[in-house]
Image (spheres, grey):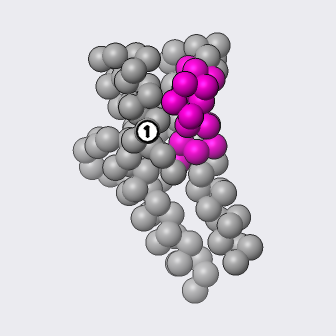
Amino acid sequence: MESRKLAQSSFEDKILGCVDRGMASLGESARQAILWHIERNSHVKRKEIPTKPKQFIDALKVMLGPGVYLVERLIVREVHLAFGIAGSLESFGGAVSRARGVWREREEWTNK
């Protein structure tokens, strides 16, 4: 049970790293300000982003308007790179779902 929690935490940390790298083009101060604003106004804490990807993107959309699509693509690209996912870029929620599947397959493979 403890190893499952650790694996889940590692997965979430990896997703959060993808979010940080995807938002890096905005600059560190802007990234921090956006995350603070989202937590304050949309009640999506940074640590909840991997479990609430749609709410996160919806909150970004309120802040960035049409610019959200570029930022979302950058984040999704980072998820694809980090988890070795091939194929077209989908929504952030879709990328997180696919990454979770890849993560579980790897976890099962290493536990055999």
Which one is nearer the viewer's eye here, 112 or 7? 7
Q: Is residue 94 above or below residue 55?
A: below
Q: Residue at x 53, y 78 (%)?
A: 108
Q: In the shown orientation, is residue 91 left or right of residue 112? A: left
Residue 93 percent coordinates (x, y): 38, 46
The amino acid sitting under disc 1 is Gln
Residue at the farthest right position: 2
Q: Residue at x 29, y 43 (%)?
A: 90
Q: Element type at marker 1? A: helix
Q: In the shown orientation, is residue 44 left or right of residue 93? A: right
Which one is nearer the viewer's eye here, 57 or 16? 57
Q: Residues within 10 Å of mark 1 (few under 14, many from 20)?
A: some
Magenta-drawn segment: 34-50
Examine the structure image and report whether residue 45 is included in the region drawn in magenta: yes
Q: In the shown orientation, is residue 21 left or right of residue 84? A: right
Examine the structure image and report whether residue 92 is included in the region drawn in magenta: no
Magenta part mainly helix, strand or loop?
helix
Q: Quadrant of the N terminus?
A: bottom right
Residue 52 seen in this snapshot: yes
The image quarter in which residue 6 lies: bottom right
Q: Quadrant of the C terminus?
A: bottom right
Q: Mark 1 sits on what residue?
A: 55
Q: Is residue 4 above or below residue 54?
A: below
